[in-house]
Image (tube, rainbow, N blue to C red):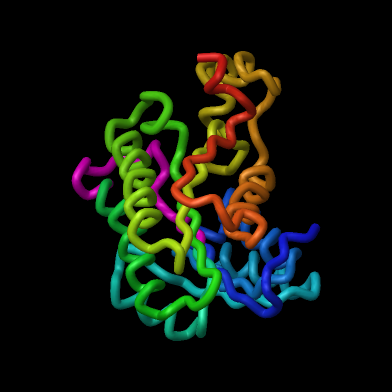
Amino acid sequence: MEFAFPAGATVVVTGAGSGIGRATALLAARVGLRVAAWDLAGDAVTGTADEITAAGGSAVARVVDVADPAAVRGAFADSGPTTYLVNNAGPASSVDVDFDRALALTVGSVRTVTDAWLASRPGDGAAVVNVASVAGNLVGTDSAWYCAGKAAIAGYTRHLATRLAPAVRANTVAPGLIDTPRTAGFAASRLGRDLVARNPMGRAGRPEEVAGAVLFLLSPLAGYLNGVLLPVDGGWMVTQ
């Protein structure tokens, strides 16, 4: 698969231990990027990096708390020049957490990582893709903090797009119901089954399908896409 990335460029992928983040890291390596895989789960993110290197790619694993500014700055210092950033890490919607704290973990951490990335001087052709959701942006769901946080990520991305271009492009993907370890319980529920039944594609999405959208938006092929909110939902929203 050809995305026209410059040879040797590095991407940081947060939340790379599983789900969409893992799929994004694996695809990034397959298209020739050097991957800095970040996650709180050490064994999981090491597994992602090991899979990449076993397949002949280049990857390093870092255990990073994206809500800790000092840890984030240190991880960027270890990663070296980083042209691309994927802000994917964040708490699952099912987590029972205080609203204000949840927003700090959801959108506050995206800002923390992005600020540190920008301070590291990402260089020519820099691009960031933030992972939001159809929740909060195109549909209202539980929980309150999840909807608010995912909408805030899209709003923050639009801010970046208008203030940083043309030096840096910023875009957002908004996944629908994606088949990941986090959503396994929900997908098996009555509501989850109903959502799948009403999806024109007749199934949940795969993490690899979100990863493809992320890599496209990062790539030079999307050089005139900036400030986009791209649903990756199988067309579910057009049925609502």
Q: Is residue 194 left or right of residue 75?
A: right
Residue 166: where, in percent of width, then height?
45, 64
Magenta span: predominant SS is loop
Q: Is residue 170 left or right of residue 4?
A: left
Residue 42 visible (yes or no): no
Q: Looking at the image, which is closer to me, 224 or 69?
A: 224
* Location of residue 199 (image quadrant): top right
Q: Residue at x 60, y 14 (%)?
A: 198
Q: Residue at x 31, y 44 (%)?
A: 152
Q: Looking at the image, which is closer to me, 45 or 123?
A: 123
Residue 144: where, in percent of width, then height?
28, 31
Residue 169: where, in percent of width, then height?
48, 59
Q: Is residue 227 left or right of residue 217?
A: left
Q: Is residue 185 left or right of residue 104?
A: right
Image height of 10 relative to 45, above or below: below
Quadrant, the N terminus: bottom right
Membership of 208 in magenta stretch? no
Membership of 97 in magenta stretch? yes
Image height of 11 relative to 219, above or below: below
Residue 11 visible (yes or no): yes
Image height of 215 relative to 45, above or below: above
Residue 13: where, in percent of width, then height?
53, 63
Q: Residue at x 56, y 60 (%)?
A: 17
Q: Looking at the image, which is closer to me, 183 or 135?
A: 135
Q: Looking at the image, which is closer to me, 66 or 232?
A: 232
* Location of residue 148 (image quadrant): top left
Q: Residue at x 67, y 40 (%)?
A: 206
Q: Which residues are magenta?
A: 86-102
